[in-house]
Image (cartoon, rainbow, N blue to C red):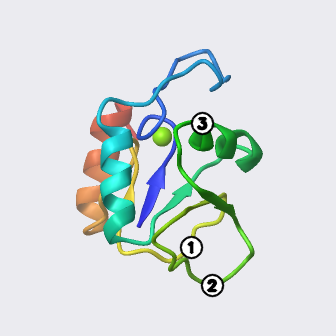
């Protein structure tokens, strides 16, 4: 299971790219602990992983950095990566679920105000 970092785990702050002073999204830490007890979870982020790992560690999460393996299967620690590793679920605050192009283009148009 892949989780986005900004806006899903860590609160977003428009115009402020520094995560050091930001807290978690309400419910994120508890949910993350529950998910880690049941699934192999990795954080998929566009950020430098060296920035994200200390933030997660500060909330008590054991982390691992990407070794380039084809999958992530460990349940007791979070992988933090920039790589889109295969997963059953990708949780992202900016995602649109793809069913077909007609539906996707409609949602893109409504979201962006026009294609
Ligand atoms: Mg995000």
Q: Quadrant of residue 25?
A: top left
Q: Which mark is residue 58?
A: 3
Q: Is residue 69 left or right of residue 92?
A: right
Precedes in sequence: disc 3 or disc 2:
3
Q: Is residue 99 left or right of residue 57?
A: left
Q: Residues within 10 Å of mark 1 (few under 14, many from 20)?
A: some
Provide the secondary structure element on which disc 1 rests: loop
| CA gap, disc 2 and disc 1 | 7 Å
Q: Which mark is residue 9?
A: none
Q: Residues within 10 Å of mark 2 (few under 14, many from 20)?
A: few
Label 1 vs label 3, nearer the camera: 3
Q: Nearer the viewer, residue 114 or 11?
A: 11
Provide the secondary structure element on which disc 3 rests: helix
Residue under circle 2? 70
Q: Is residue 49 above or below residue 71?
A: above
Q: Is residue 106 left or right of residue 112?
A: left
Q: Quadrant of the N terminus?
A: bottom left
**For the residues bearing labels 2 and 1, Cβ distance under 8 angstroms:** yes
Precedes in sequence: disc 1 or disc 3:
3
Where is residue 95 shown, x and y percent of the image? Answer: 38, 50
Precedes in sequence: disc 2 or disc 1:
2
Q: Quadrant of the C terminus?
A: top left
Residue drawn at the location 48% of the way across and 33% of the way down: 10
Where is residue 63 shown, x and y percent of the image? Answer: 62, 57
Where is residue 39 shown, x and y percent of the image? Answer: 36, 71
Residue under circle 1? 85
């Amino acid at each position: 299971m892949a989780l986005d970092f900004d806006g899903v785990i860590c609160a977003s702050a428009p115009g402020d790219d520094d995560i050091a002073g930001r807290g978690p999204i309400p419910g994120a830490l508890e949910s993350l602990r529950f998910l880690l007890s049941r699934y192999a979870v990795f954080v998929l982020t566009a950020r430098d992983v060296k920035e994200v790992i200390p933030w997660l560690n500060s909330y008590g999460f054991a982390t691992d950095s990407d070794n380039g393996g084809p999958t992530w299967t460990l349940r007791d620690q979070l992988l933090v990566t920039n790589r889109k590793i295969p997963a059953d679920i990708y949780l992202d605050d900016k995602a649109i679920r793809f069913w077909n192009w007609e539906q996707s283009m409609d949602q893109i148009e409504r979201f962006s105000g026009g294609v």
